[in-house]
Amino acid sequence: MTICIVDQHFSINKILMRAVALWPYHRTKFVKFHLFLFFIILISFIVFQ
C-alpha cells in the first residue's frame, strides 16, 4: 500500500484553485456564486460612488 504524494498535492491544488475560481475544468455552483457575488459588489461600488 503506497500513497502517491503527487496525487495528494494535485488534490490540494485542485481544492485551493476551485476555492478562488481558477480551476478550469468545472463550473460548479460555488464558482457561479463567486462570480455573481463579485459582480454585485462591483456594481454596488459603482452605484454608490
Image (cartoon, grey):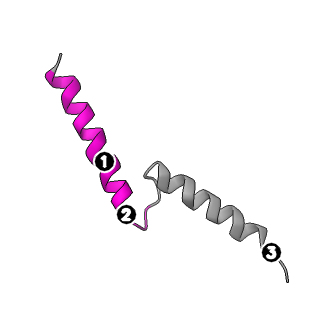
Q: Amino acid at mark 3?
A: Ile
**Residue drawn at point x = 47 percent, y = 59 percent:** 23
Residue ID at (26%, 33%):
41
Q: Quadrant of residue 5?
A: bottom right
**What residue span does the magenta drawing correspond to?**
24-47
Number of numbered markers:
3
Residue 20: where, in percent of width, then height? 47, 48
Work out whether mark 3 precedes mark 1 in sequence or the reverse, and give the earlier one: 3
Residue 21 location, x and y as percent? 43, 52
Tag 1: amino acid = Leu
Give the dominant element type of the magenta stretch: helix, strand or loop. helix
Per the rendering, the mark at residue 3 is 3
When the figure is inspected, residue 7 is found, relative to residue 2, above or below; the finding is above
6 with respect to 19 (left or right): right
Residue on which disc 1 sits? 35
- Residue sitting at the far left: 47
**Which numbered disc, 2 or 1, marks the residue that appears first in the sequence?**
2
Q: Secondary structure at mark 3?
A: loop
Tell whether 22 sits left or right of 15: left
Disc 3 from disc 1: Cα separation: 36 Å
Residue indicated by mark 2 = 28
Rounded to the nearest whole Å, what is the CA distance between mark 2 and mark 1? 11 Å
Q: Is residue 46 above or below residue 18?
A: above
Quarter the N terminus occupies: bottom right
Tell me which corner region of the image, top left, top right, bottom left or bottom right, holds residue 46.
top left
Seen at 46% across and 53% down, the residue is 22
Can you give x and y, in whole percent of width and height, for residue 47 in the image?
14, 23
Q: Residues within 10 Å of mark 1 (few under 14, many from 20)?
A: few
Q: Amino acid at mark 2?
A: Thr
